[in-house]
């Protein structure tokens, strides 16, 4: 008998845009950069997003902002995510994204960090749901590509309004809404409450609901589909150090044996990621990137703390490459992350 969620790895539609599957990779500020997306493209997620960009610098043509939106054909389907608190800028910013050739444009109403929320952007938009609707409507009116929105369950436990925003986004013309099962107040603490995603799916009439939060394994994705009945999943931190997670999901849903991802496999993937960073960034920035991402691929290894210390003090890219090549460790028994719903 076919797996009940086998259809999630068949074409998935956002408006009139057909994506290869309903397994999407999220925008991750400081993480889902060009090299990261080159790695992810090898495993063919249904859609991946560039890092979030602010509307104002995009409209000014800021060079650093535009560089965040670099992509190549292998990364398609490709999405851009906009962040800002002024709905009057949303349509213009979305039009620039469309002109740059993106397949989807997303509006961020979920980022919880203070430097984003202090001007009313990101998850601070949850406090003014009507402004979310205004921004989405402006974007929908300005472009022909699908418009999506990403939210959290609410600002705090006492201000859960995700189902209300689902209806607002639907009325404004959004093709899909991604719901993270935590509040802004929670940050990334505790477990994501998938019940909120389920409630959003029940509130939706035509808009697609995309589940997000605590998807660190293929089994967790399967559990989210079962628990929430969501239309698709958006994997965020679960892609860090395992850009192949979509392949693991596909194997599970097809009833195939899990692939062996041993230390040598992870080393080869990290070296490949390293080479892509070196090809795209100058040496100083490449070193900084490797200090951040180097441990992602070895997170199940017993000696990862020692590796982290060494890579954080490396002064030359050659040192970094040697550290990766020479790393030896037995894997630890415990999983990196255990989802509440497993």
Image: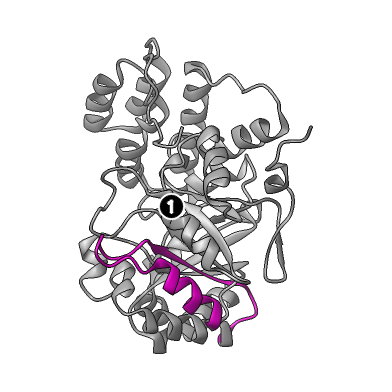
> In the image shown, does 191 or 247 lie closer to the viewer?
191
Residue at position x 30%, y 36% in the image = 291
> In the image shown, does 107 or 41 lie closer to the viewer?
107
Residue at position x 66%, y 36% in the image = 250
Quadrant the N terminus occupies: top right
Give coordinates of residue 118: x percent, y percent.
20, 71
Reply yes or no: does residue 138 show up in magenta: no
Residue named by callout 1: 195
> In the image shown, does 206 or 26 lie closer to the viewer?
206
Give coordinates of residue 182: x percent, y percent.
34, 54
What scheme was used to colour the molecule?
one colour
The residue furthest right is 1
Residue at position x 70%, y 45% in the image = 9
Image: 216 above or below 207:
above
Tell me the magenta residue range: 142-171
Count of labels in the image: 1
Give coordinates of residue 51: x percent, y percent.
43, 59
Image: 168 above or below 63:
below
- Left or right: residue 180 versus residue 157 is right
Residue at position x 61%, y 56% in the image = 231
Judged from the image, the secondary structure of the residue bearing numbered disc 1 is: helix
Reply yes or no: does residue 156 show up in magenta: yes
Query: Crowding near pointer 1: few (<14 within 10 Å), some, many (20+)?
Result: some
**Quarter assignment of residue 174:** bottom right
- Left or right: residue 228 versus residue 277 is right
Give coordinates of residue 277: x percent, y percent.
44, 42
């Amino acid at each position: 008998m076919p797996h009940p969620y086998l259809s999630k790895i068949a074409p998935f539609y956002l408006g009139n845009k057909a994506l290869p599957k309903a397994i999407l990779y999220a925008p991750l500020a400081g993480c889902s950069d060009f090299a990261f997306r080159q790695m992810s493209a090898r495993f063919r997620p249904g859609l991946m997003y560039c890092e979030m960009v602010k509307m104002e610098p995009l409209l000014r043509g800021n060079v650093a902002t535009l560089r965040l939106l670099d992509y190549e054909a292998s990364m398609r389907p490709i999405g851009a995510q906009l962040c800002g608190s002024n709905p009057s800028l949303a349509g213009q910013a979305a039009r620039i994204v469309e002109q740059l050739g993106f397949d989807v444009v997303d509006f961020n109403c979920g980022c919880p960090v203070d430097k984003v929320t202090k001007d009313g952007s990101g998850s601070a938009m949850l406090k003014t749901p009507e402004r979310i609707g205004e921004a989405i409507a402006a974007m929908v009116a300005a472009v022909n590509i699908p418009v999506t929105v990403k939210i959290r369950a609410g600002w705090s436990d006492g201000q859960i309004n995700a189902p209300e925003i689902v209806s607002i986004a639907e009325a404004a013309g959004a093709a899909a809404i991604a719901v993270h099962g935590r509040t802004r107040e929670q940050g990334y603490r505790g477990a994501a409450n998938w019940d909120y995603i389920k409630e959003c799916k029940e509130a939706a009439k035509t808009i697609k609901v995309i589940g997000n939060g605590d998807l660190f394994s293929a089994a967790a994705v399967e559990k989210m589909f079962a628990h929430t009945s969501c239309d698709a999943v958006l994997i965020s931190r679960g892609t860090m150090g395992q850009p192949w997670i979509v392949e693991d999901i596909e194997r599970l849903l097809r009833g195939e044996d899990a692939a062996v991802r041993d230390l040598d496999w992870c080393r080869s993937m990290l070296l490949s990621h390293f080479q892509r960073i070196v090809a795209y960034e100058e040496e100083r920035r490449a070193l900084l990137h490797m200090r951040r991402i180097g441990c992602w691929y070895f997170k199940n290894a017993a000696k990862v703390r020692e590796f982290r210390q060494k890579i954080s003090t490396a002064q030359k890219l050659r040192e970094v490459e040697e550290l990766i090549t020479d790393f030896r460790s037995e894997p630890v028994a415990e999983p990196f992350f255990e989802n509440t719903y497993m």
